[in-house]
Image (tube, rainbow, N blue to C red):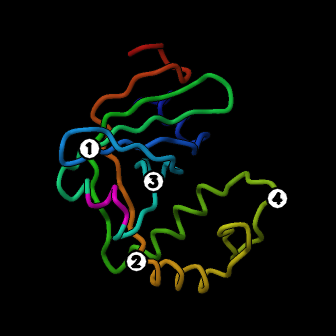
Amino acid sequence: MDEAVMAFLDAHHSAAMTTLRRDGTAHAVRIGVALVDGKIWSSGTQRRLRTKHLRRDSRSTLFVFDSEWRWLTAECRVNILDGPDAPQQHVRLFQVMQRGMQPQPPPGRIRWYGSEKTIEEFLQIMRDEERLIYEFEALRVYGMYGGAPGR
């Protein structure tokens, strides 16, 4: 990923994620994404349909967009991070996603479905919900995101 791609992903967290059903048709959902330590991450759960799809076929397409007309498409392979450190990885993911949020959550707190949680409360929710991280490996990127259009 070049600097323009990284800058767009760093600033924009709204995305659509497409996975493939067993019959090859697309399954698309709206998600949040963030660039964490140079990698594209999103949150999911063990029971999500998209998790089932990815365990069978790791291909996915991300469509990241802003509130205007800029967009970025990334054709990816997805690695599911669901080890014992997944709850703590969510802390990092949500801290990155909530940077610049207005109002900003106070230090040591994370916003979750409209309410502020302590880190410990948030970690327990992540464990209870069996949360995992989708880590996207971008194989091909194109769009109108500040780089050359239509790459």
Q: Which residue position holds label 1?
A: 20
**Relative image position of residue 59 (x, y in whole percent):** 24, 43
Element type where label 3 sits in the image: loop
Q: CA distance from mark 1 to mark 4?
A: 37 Å
**Which range of residues does the magenta coloring cover?**
48-52
Q: Which residue is mark 3?
A: 37
The image's mark for residue 103 is 4
Q: Reading the chain from its start, which is encountered first: label 2 or label 4?
A: 4
**Is the C-beta separation of discs 3 and 1 under 8 Å?**
no
Residue 17 appears left or right of 4: left
Q: Alpha-carbon distance for marks 1 and 2?
A: 22 Å
Measure the alpha-carbon separation of dots 3 and 1: 27 Å
Which of the numbered marks, if any, corresponds to residue 130?
A: 2
- Whether 35 is among the magenta residues is no
Tags 2 and 3 touching, CB below 8 Å? no
Q: Which amino acid lies under the numbered mark 1 shown in the image of this protein? A: Leu
At label 2, the amino acid type is Glu
